[in-house]
Image: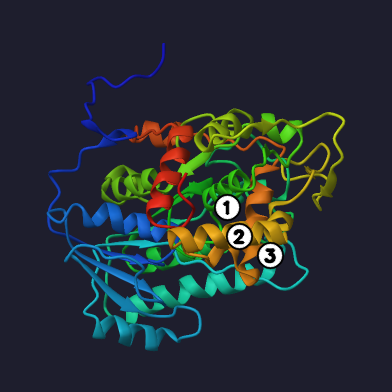
Amino acid sequence: MPNTPSKPITDRVYSNGLFHGLPVLDAIKGQSAIVAGANGISGVHMLRILSKAPERWSEIHSLSRRPLQEKFGENVKHTAVDFLDTSPEEIAEKLKEGNVKGDYVFFFAYVQPREDGQGLWSMAEKMCEVNGKLLSNFLAALTIADIHPKRIILQTGAKHYGYHLGPARCPSHETDSRVDIEPNFYYTQEDILAKWCNQNNCTWSVARPSFILGSVQGNAMNVAIPLGIYAAVQKALGRNLHFPGDIRAWDTIQDQSSAYLNAYFEEWCALSESCDNESFNLTDGSPFSYGKFWPKLAERYGLEYTKPSEKGVYQQVDMPHDPPPRGFGSPGVLKMSFTLAQWARAPEVQEAFNRLAKEQGLDTWAMKEENIDAVFSFTDYAICWSWPLMLSMDKARKHGFFGFVDSYDSYLATFEEAAEMKLIPKV
């Protein structure tokens, strides 16, 4: 007989638009929060969610190098600070000047080192160095500034399981052992955080999302923005919506993680005692494939679309590790009939986009030459991915989080929001 509680446990949940099963947190009042890395896709969405609950979050301190890219409520106060190229003592002084305090910390700061000719995520040791330093400098500054949070939420991701290096154990669970085929900065950060919390009477939680869907300015690791630009420009050129990957990429199940749902989860996780010193996978809870999504994308833009062909001509990219992260089998393979990075540089594409940008007053950041590789290569990798990426949500459910969003609906809603923000052309 299964082990069941002797007394039923009741949780209150609600729906908000596309998002369902969200936790009711009304009883919690007067908390303060620090959002570090406040201008990235996760930091912005965290601020959007927290700032809408001023009774619960009476004081929110956003930290980033640059000024905030949008306005929030009066409960949000910004402090400009650099965690990488500034000493902990200098960071602490900035925190003191800004009267920064936080019962809870949400840490999203991230640096992606890049060098010409290097592939995405190829600089593993450098990523450990810089992202470890980001976190350790920040934590040391909290100590110096006499800031004592109750809990720190660190967001990492699916790279924890090695998915970026090839086929991994799937579905992945939080108890899976670390993948040691190359350095992983998520492990570096988790170890730094756990040690600091143990020494400072603080608890921690780690959230591990998959590809994140959301609308923010100047964010390279965002699949929705390049796809919205691609579809709109193809329509302007009178072309079909061609799928760049092969049939395996078309069919592969790939969990998505909507930035709004991530923020709802991380708020709940910070405030839930059951999450003390625990790691959690974090996805929409909605099976997703680009083969199912591509017709929906085409329909939104009024386009015909093409499917992958078994006889198509593809450029092949072999992943570097044999065996792959799961420990056996063949290395991962990506096949592309073309790349969106190449497409974005085509003269007729640039001309069509610039015309739309002028007509609609669009933000042109993503289509500038210096940003194309960072923005569109990430999307090429995501949609031509040919091995399953599934993160089990069982642990989060057992701990009491039941949030859900249909990833297809979330993608389309992200396009609507991005168009309103002038990040992509309107239909």
Q: Amino acid at mark 2?
A: Val
Task: Decide which of tag 1 and tag 3 comes sooner along the chain.
Answer: 3
Here the colouring is rainbow
User: Label 2 neighbourhood size at 10 Å, few (<14), some (14-19), many (20+)?
Assistant: many
- Residue corresponding to mark 2: 375
Please report the residue visible at 16 percent of the width from the left and 53 percent of the height from the top.
Answer: 56
Residue 202 sits above or below residue 29 on the image:
below
Judged from the image, the secondary structure of the residue bearing numbered disc 1 is: helix
Residue 121 sits above or below residue 53 on the image:
below
Task: Report the mark closest to the observer, 1 or 3.
Answer: 1
User: Which quarter of the picture shows residue 345?
Assistant: bottom right
**Marks 2/3: CA–CA distance:** 19 Å
The percent position of residue 142, horizontal first and vertical second, equals 33, 76
- Residue corresponding to mark 3: 124
Judged from the image, the secondary structure of the residue bearing numbered disc 2 is: helix
Question: Decide: marks 1, 3 in contact (CB < 8 A)?
Answer: no
Question: Decide: marks 1, 2 in contact (CB < 8 A)?
Answer: yes
- Residue corresponding to mark 1: 226
Compared across the picture, whether 359 is left or right of 254 comes to left
